[in-house]
Image: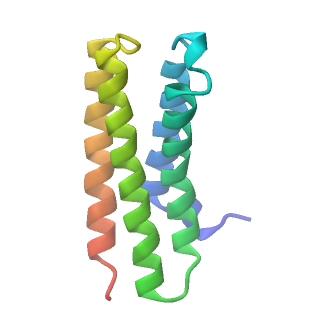
Amino acid sequence: MTYFFEKLEIWQLSIDFSVEIYNVTIDFPSEEKFGVTNQIRRASNSVSANIAEGSSRLGNKERARFYQIAYSSLMEVLSFLILSNRLNFLSTSSFTDLRIRLEELSNKINSYYKTIEL
């Protein structure tokens, strides 16, 4: 059985993005395990989780709220990516690649949000 949210491109992209966040944060300093590493992973997981939860809501207003939260979590990830790059935990090339993927995902979340009739 496949649930509706699993078919959504924005959910699939957000899961892929979260996996990439996990992959790049493996090399973060061990003393950041409960700091930046944990925070950026939790924020990236929140994107897909809120998309999944929002897709199950019956009312458009409630559904839209969860997509807004997913977008906000994505902006939190961006903030941590910028910080990680400035602290040299993340190379500039990895930062640039992740930022491009983040922008694509944010545009798709916004487009999906706009299709909901409030």
Visible residue check, residue 7: no
Q: Nearer the viewer, residue 87 or 91?
A: 87
**Location of residue 92 by image quarter:** top left
Question: What residue do we see at 53% from left, 10% from top?
Answer: 29
16 left or right, relative to 61: right
The N terminus, quarter of image: bottom right
Given residues 21 and 2, the one toward you in this image is: 21
Quarter of the figure that contains the C terminus: bottom left
Asked whether, in this view, residue 88 is left or right of residue 100, the answer is: right
Residue at image coords 46%, 78%: 63
- In percent of width and height, residue 15 lies at 53, 44
Image location (x, y in percent) of residue 3:
65, 67
Q: Quadrant of residue 33 in the image?
A: top right
Q: Above or below — where is 103 with respect to 87?
A: below
Residue at x 37%, y 56% (from the top left corner): 72
- Please tell me whether residue 64 is drawn above or below residue 20 in the rendered image: below
Q: How is the image coloured?
A: rainbow
**Residue in the picture at 25% in, 54% down:** 107
Which residue in the rendered view is the most extreme toward the right?
A: 1
Residue 81, x across and y down, in percent: 35, 29
